[in-house]
Amino acid sequence: MTNTTSGPARVGWIDALKGIGILTVAAGHIFPHPVAKYLYIFHMPLFFFIGGFLFKPSENSREFFTKKAFHLLVPYVVFLCLIYVPCEVSEYLDNKESLKEAFARPVLGGRYLVGWCAVFWYITCFFLVQQLMNYLVNNVKRTFIAWLMFVCLLISYALNRWLPSFWLPWNADVVFAAIPIFYTGYLYKSCQSEMAKFKWVWILMMAGAFVLTWYYPENIYEMKSGRYGIPFVTLLSALMIIFGLIEIAKLTEHSVFVSKPLSELGKASMIVMYLHQPVQLIMLEHLSITSPVLRFLVAVTVSMGGYYLLNNMEIGRALFLGSIADFRKIFGRNKLATV
């Protein structure tokens, strides 16, 4: 779901992988638990992994911060205004929520965002992961980073076990669980050709991870709520599935009829993330459409339409896709020229 609007040439299989990932995210929010539980093993770890693979460290921390803030936080704020405010006004007028709660939710974000904006937690958590990793890569030795990742995992499991109700604004507590996955994606970039030699092994192990979850339903990630499944086992299960999906995404490149729609979905993944939940909840709560298949198809289709509409307008790319180049054209902020 990371936005790569203004970046280098895209990697085809990465877009296809993101396309697969965003379909699983939407499906996980719409289909009932017997289906969704298998998607919750890997669908959010997948996007942190992809973010690590695409991560390019910058020694200029201020420039890195500004660039990522535009790419991630500008759309986050704009979509909050577009989606959260009307919904919250309705809740307040119906006396379902106090004014204090209405103002606190968008400020605290993370676990406090529910309903139409429930998936927004990922953006702020991902932003924090990027900033922390950029600092570590530029200031800490690689061997020590590996130990830090292990410590972060231990902290995440400790919070899950002994402080399950503890959480921080912007889901900053989830950074402990997310950054080791992000770093794994970053390391994978340098050894992907070696890993690819075992593609059928990864696909078989992916199947094994699903079988394991059949017998152990707790083998799932619910990252937003700080539940990380079985310590180390669920992480390994997620990685096995991710490695398997990478090989599947690479195989789709041989068929344009498969790779093209998946790649388009991948490019639109941020917009699909923001829009699929409001669309499917409107269908469920206001139109009484209970079919998960229909809600899934309509939610993805409408979200894709929103992406194409926004991507064809400078203002859409600037505000909703986080394009600094388009923002600079519209608002004439010369000091952004170096970003």
Image: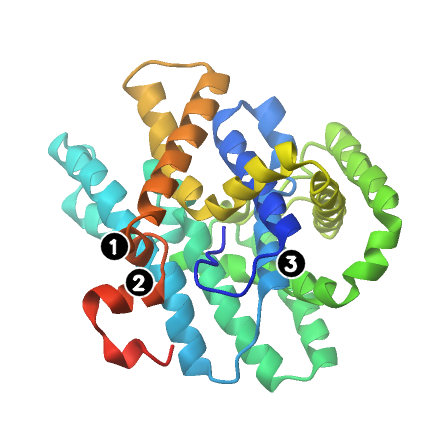
Front-most of 187 and 247?
A: 247
Instruction: Name the side, left or right, on which 62 lies relative to 84.
Output: right
Residue at 52% over, 24% down = 31
Residue at (53% x, 49% y) in the render: 226
Looking at the image, is mark 3 or mark 2 nearer the viewer? 2
Q: CA distance from mark 3 to mark 2?
A: 32 Å
Q: Residue at x 27, y 19 (%)?
A: 286
- The residue singled out by tag 1 in the image is 315
Q: Which quadrant holds residue 326?
A: bottom left
**N-terminal-most mark, 1 or 3:** 3
Which label number is shown at residue 211? none
Q: Under tag 3, what secondary structure?
A: helix
Amino acid type at mark 3: Ile
Image: 27 above or below 331: above
Q: Nearer the viewer, residue 312 or 50?
A: 312
240 vs 80, left or right, is: right
Say whether marks 1 and 2 touch (CB < 8 Å): yes
Give the vertical position of 40 relative to 332 (above or below).
Answer: above
Give amino acid for label 2.
Asp
Q: How many marks?
A: 3
Q: Residues within 10 Å of mark 3 (few under 14, many from 20)?
A: many
Q: Which residue does the numbered mark 2 point to in the structure image? A: 326
| Residue designated by label 3 | 181
Residue 73: x, y in percent?
35, 61
Alpha carbon of mark 1 to alpha carbon of mark 3: how far?
34 Å
Few, some or many residues within 10 Å of mark 2 (<14, 14–19, 20+): some
Residue 67 picture location, percent across and down: 40, 71
Between the residue at mark 1 and the residue at mark 2, the CA separation in whole angstroms equals 7 Å
Q: Position of residue 255 (x, y in %)?
A: 69, 36
